[in-house]
Amino acid sequence: MTPPDTGGPSVFVRDGDQWVRLDVQDILYVEADDDQAHIATAQRRFTVNRTLKQVLEGLPQESLQRVHRSFAVNLRNVTAYSEGHLHLGGRQLPVGRSFKRELVQRLNLL
């Protein structure tokens, strides 16, 4: 049986003893944790044995934006931006100084 095509890019991540499809649009953020990364969605969180950089290299470039040395976010899910922080999925994530300029450009602030 073939899983339904959601029309957008997706990846497969390990969930116990199986691989499950994860639509890139469902990713809220990715968090670095040494040599692992945690991929957060609205429903759950997946841990993969890859660095944040490796995870981002495996995803479409326009999907996620690096905002901190430990975080990348899906800009489609950002609900608010305040100086130094992004708000999404009920969480507040930090924005690093070196990532701020590119983030502000991509957010299209008026």
Image (cartoon, helix red, strand yellow):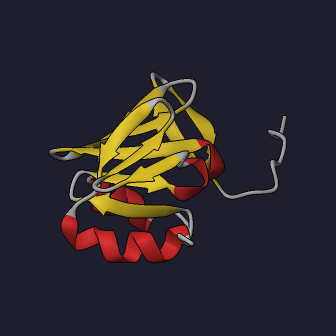
> Residue 3: which quarter of the image?
top right
Residue closer to the observer: 13 or 98: 98
Q: Where is residue 17 in the image (x, y as percent from the top left)?
A: 48, 23
Left or right position of 81 against 109:
left
Q: Is residue 61 visible?
A: no
Left or right position of 107 against 104:
right
Q: Where is residue 47 in the image (x, y as percent from the top left)?
A: 36, 34
| Residue 66 position (above or below residue 92) | below
Q: Where is residue 54 in the image (x, y as percent from the top left)?
A: 33, 61
| Label tally | 0
| Residue 100 position (above or below residue 76) | below
Q: Where is residue 67 in the image (x, y as percent from the top left)?
A: 33, 60
> Residue 87: which quarter of the image?
top left
The residue at 20%/67% (across/down) is: 97
> Residue 45: which quarter of the image?
top left
Q: In which quarter of the image is the N terminus?
A: top right
Residue closer to the observer: 47 or 89: 89
Residue closer to the observer: 32 or 49: 32
The residue at 27%/55% (across/down) is: 84
Q: Quadrant of the C terminus?
A: bottom right
Q: Which residue lies furthest to the front in this view?
A: 110
Q: Can residue 75 be seen in this view?
A: yes
The residue at 50%/40% (across/down) is: 13
Left or right position of 10 against 38:
right
Q: Which residue lies furthest to the left in this view?
A: 34
